[in-house]
Image (cartoon, helix red, strand yellow):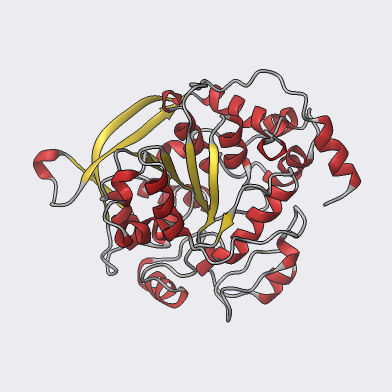
Amino acid sequence: MHSTKFSLLFTAALSVSASPIRRNETAKRYAILDNDWSSVGFIPFLMALDAGIEILALTSSTSDSWQKQCAYHALATLEIGNLSCVPVIYGATYPLINTPERFQAWEMVHGVLPWQGAFAPYNATAEALGSDPTSGPDPNRIEKAAFLEGFPNSTAVEGKMAASFMIEQVHKYPGQVSIYSGGALTNIALAVRMDEDFASLAKELVVMGGYVDVNMLQATGSVNQADLNSDINLMMDPEAAKIAFTADFPSITIAGNVANQVQSTQVFLDEIYEVKNPYSELVYNHYGTLFPFWDETAMGLLIDPTLSVNSTTVLMDVDVAYASPNYGNVHVYQTALMPPHVRNVTYVNTIDADRLKSMIKHSVQYPAQPCSS
């Protein structure tokens, strides 16, 4: 994938028209993007860069795969766009409590999730054929066959871990650092517990995950529809989600059900590929049309909250009862009926879909070049 063809494609894509993103050009914005990065999971960081946000780091989260494999994907997808000046920092390998064995035991009682992420049973054959690692003997193993984008030459930052880096940066830039979560919330919860001032010093927390009242959709639709409505990011580490959602961030924005609003379609992928570069080629060939733009929705809301056209301020908590069939799912309350220690979040119900697609399209077709300046 690191071919002359890709380099030429990338260079050709750098003539940029005006970005469709509405932003304040004078205010410096910082963000730390925490995610279970993948071969086609790069659109959120392209969107952030396109919006003029300085990404302090990409941090890796165990969710769809183990965090180290995800960190390598972050490194590789930065490299293909000459964006390796953006640091990549390893996150926690394991959730606070959950393990593959514990998760699979829960499934024996309450039913199997259509997508189990890193906790799916180990399958050496699937990994050899290009799947990211799941369960298995070594959570730090790297499966090179999964790197559709090419294997990275760069490395993650030595001597730093995601939670401590997050704490360091909010103290350096108090009130200016947005924390983005597109995977499990383990790293964020660790930062909350390590430093009692961490959450309050951040600018905000924006999360992809937190579905409300989707059980009927899980039960009556196809397996793929059940997958679209399964909260794997929270269920991977429910205890971390509870800590993060009840921490004293100045604001918390939840892209839950709304993350299913904008579906990937072949027509849209064709539009993106009208401008050829390494990113648009990966999106065109490998993003597919089975899934919505989940993580991109959350990033769009971080970039511009007015992307939301309908939202609710609601009290939210996470079920952490291991014996519950709703383990790892959210529950919302009104003030008169709330339990202790919950807090208000902004729960987005509807977004401007056309604007989100414009943000995605522009960021992929004309990747920003902060590393060349």
Please indicate whether residue 369 sits to the left or right of residue 230 in the image. right
**Residue 73 drawn above or below residue 313:** below
Q: Is residue 162 above or below residue 215?
A: below
- State the image coordinates of residue 182 (x, y, percent, origin top left): 49, 48
Is residue 43 or residue 125 the one in the foreground?
43
Q: Quadrant of the C terminus?
A: top right
Tell me what residue is drawn at x 37 percent, y 31 percent.
349
Which one is nearer the viewer's eye here, 181 or 331?
181
The residue nearer to you, when weighing 172 against 297, is 172
* Whether residue 130 is visible: yes
Whether residue 326 is visible here, answered yes or no, is no
- Seen in the picture, residue 168 relative to 133 is either above or below; the reply is above
| Residue reaching furthest to the left | 336
- The residue sitting at the front extreme is 172
Q: Within the image, what quadrant is residue 208 found in?
A: top left
**Count of numbered tags:** 0
Please say if 4 is above or below 28.
below
Give the residue furthest to the top: 18
Query: Which residue corresponds to the image point at 62% horizontal and 64% vertical from the top-left?
Result: 69
Location of residue 211 in the rendering, given as x and y in whole percent from the top left corner: 37, 45
Residue drawn at x 53%, y 69% is 120
Taking the spot 65% from the left edge, 41% from the top edge, the residue there is 289
Residue 223 lies, in percent from the top left, at: 52, 53
Task: Give coordinates of residue 236: x percent, y percent.
Answer: 43, 62
Q: Residue furthest right?
A: 4
